[in-house]
Amino acid sequence: MWNSKSTGSGAGAMSGPLIAVLFVVVAALIFAGVFLLLPGPEHFTALLVIGFLALLFGAISYLAESISRGPAIQRALSWGFGAFGFAILFITVGALPLLYSGLISTIGQIGLLVVLVLLLIVPVAFYGWRARGQVQDQRREEARHEWAQSAPPSAFSYAAARDPAAPTTPPENPPRGGA
């Protein structure tokens, strides 16, 4: 479903970019529906729901990377939905109570901002973990490529049979006998 390349031909096959566009359009319709279903005084709640839905869609897109051959589209969607969700949540919690007094208490606002910061630590930590893993994978692939390009040593060669860490001089003969 999420593959960036079409796996078949005919009417049932869809490309990854088309599915991504459809997913974004459906998400936008859901966001608009949530915002319109909750009346004026409840727009604060609607924006919170939209922010959390965007984070949920980002997580779904991130998990969809594992079932795709070319995960670039899913990765872009996950980062886009994540950034959109966090932006909506931080703006909603940080700015709207300042514009409309009595929306939530100052303690409630600070508590929600702390929760959002703690929630933001998770994707930042995953990004660091993933970036480190990608660097290790790249080094491993370079070593594999270098090894594949090198000529294999002959099993009959003296240099191949010798351990380079072994001493080059023979060991001294230990004394024999009892005394």
Image (cartoon, helix red, strand yellow):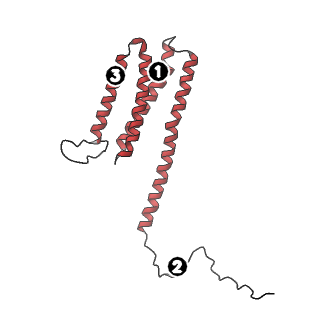
The residue beneath circle 1 is 92
> Which three-letter amino acid code belongs to the residue tagged 3?
Ala
Labels in figure, total:
3
Q: Which residue lies furthest to the bottom in this view?
A: 177
| First in residue order: circle 2 vs circle 3 | 3
**Quarter-wise, where is residue 55 in the image?**
top left
For the point 34% across and 22% down, the residue is 32
Circle 1 Cα neighbour tier, 10 Å, few/some/many (<14 / 14–19 / ≥20): many
Q: Are circles 1 and 2 on residues that touch, CB within 8 Å?
A: no
The residue beneath circle 3 is 32
The local secondary structure at tag 2 comes to helix
| First in residue order: circle 3 vs circle 1 | 3
The residue beneath circle 2 is 161
Q: In this view, does 59 lie above or below 67?
A: above
The spot of residue 46 in percent (x, y) is: 41, 19
User: How far apart are the alpha carbons under marks 3 and 1?
Assistant: 16 Å
> Which three-letter amino acid code belongs to the residue tagged 1?
Thr
For the point 26% across and 42% down, the residue is 15
The local secondary structure at tag 3 comes to helix
> Which three-letter amino acid code belongs to the residue tagged 2?
Ala
